[in-house]
Amino acid sequence: MEVRHPHAERLVFDHVSLDHLRQTNLHATNMPPMLQQLYQRLAGTLAEVLNDVRLSEQDDQFAGVLARNLARDARGGLVPSLKSVNHIIDLRNFGSEARNAILALHKKALLEDGKTAEGNSPASSPRKATPAGAPAKTIAQIDDDKEYPLKPKPLTANTPAELVDLMRQLRIWSGEPSLRELARRSCGGFAPSTLCETLKKDRLPPYELLIAFVRACGGSEQDVMAWSSAWRRIRMAQICPRDAPRQLRPI
């Protein structure tokens, strides 16, 4: 009898890869229709690939990498890149009809992602980018209980890493909206992929992105002033550390 995985390491690797695909399907349940269908189709295709007994070890490892990347994009609410979609299609050896169907679904997901707030596609009603630093579309804040204040305080940050960590906390505090939703609220202030990279690194974010992010999280003008002051203090310390002001304290 032919054995699918002769090595225990490969069994573990495939188990992890399939778990990534389960996570992908879980995240996809809250996505727009076309994007949800695309993720379900891609995750199902990779599952078929990983369960193929004829798959070489090299292709098995590549499928695992694609599964991990797919789960990462799904977690961020992003549309998978065309390159990733083509890699998945190539692994499955789809015919032209099936290939075209998936590529068409990917195109529809991109159009869906680019719709305006009124539901019109960019082709029929192009969206005008908001100038950097312009007010972003916000949502109403729900304040914390006075006895349990949880809103992140940017002026406590002393380093870029601490400021980015507070940005992550602010996103959670505001209800943990998806990166796509935050980008939509920013009205062109940043792209989901740009915000994703910013939140993954511990470098000082661009000033315009930070302000748009705070507003997209429902921040008030007072919040914007606090985050702006925190960014300026950290940046000034980077440029002229000797003359940089000491840690600010909220009044």
Image: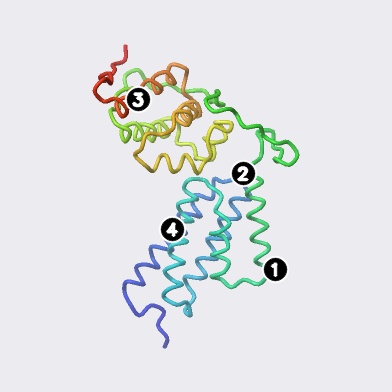
Amino acid bearing label 2: Asp
Under tag 1, what secondary structure? helix
Depth check: 119 or 167 in front? Answer: 167
Q: Quadrant of residue 172?
A: top left
Circle 1 residue: 97
Marked residue nearer the N-terminal end (2 or 4) = 4
| Image quarter (top left, top right, bottom left or bottom right) of the N terminus | bottom left
Depth check: 151 or 84 in front? Answer: 84
Q: CA distance from mark 4 to mark 1?
A: 27 Å
Q: CA distance from mark 3 to mark 1?
A: 53 Å
Q: Is residue 1 left or right of residue 123?
A: left
Q: Quadrant of residue 23?
A: bottom left
Q: Is 3 placed above or below 113 here?
A: below
Q: Is 180 placed above or below 150 here?
A: below
Amino acid bearing label 1: Glu
Q: Is residue 153 visible?
A: no
Under tag 2, what secondary structure? helix
Q: CA distance from mark 2 to mark 4?
A: 22 Å
Under tag 3, what secondary structure? helix
Marked residue nearer the N-terminal end (4 or 3) = 4
4 or 3: mark nearer the eye: 3
Amino acid bearing label 4: Arg
Marked residue nearer the N-terminal end (4 or 1) = 4
In the rendered image, residue 154, in percent from the top left (x then y), is placed at 35, 25
Amino acid bearing label 3: Pro
Q: CA distance from mark 4 to mark 3?
A: 33 Å
Residue 154 badge: 3
Marked residue nearer the N-terminal end (3 or 2) = 2
Circle 4 residue: 68
Residue at horizontal 55 percent and vertical 24 percent from the top? 134
Neighbor class of circle 1 (other Cα within 10 Å; few <14, some 14-19, many 20+) is few
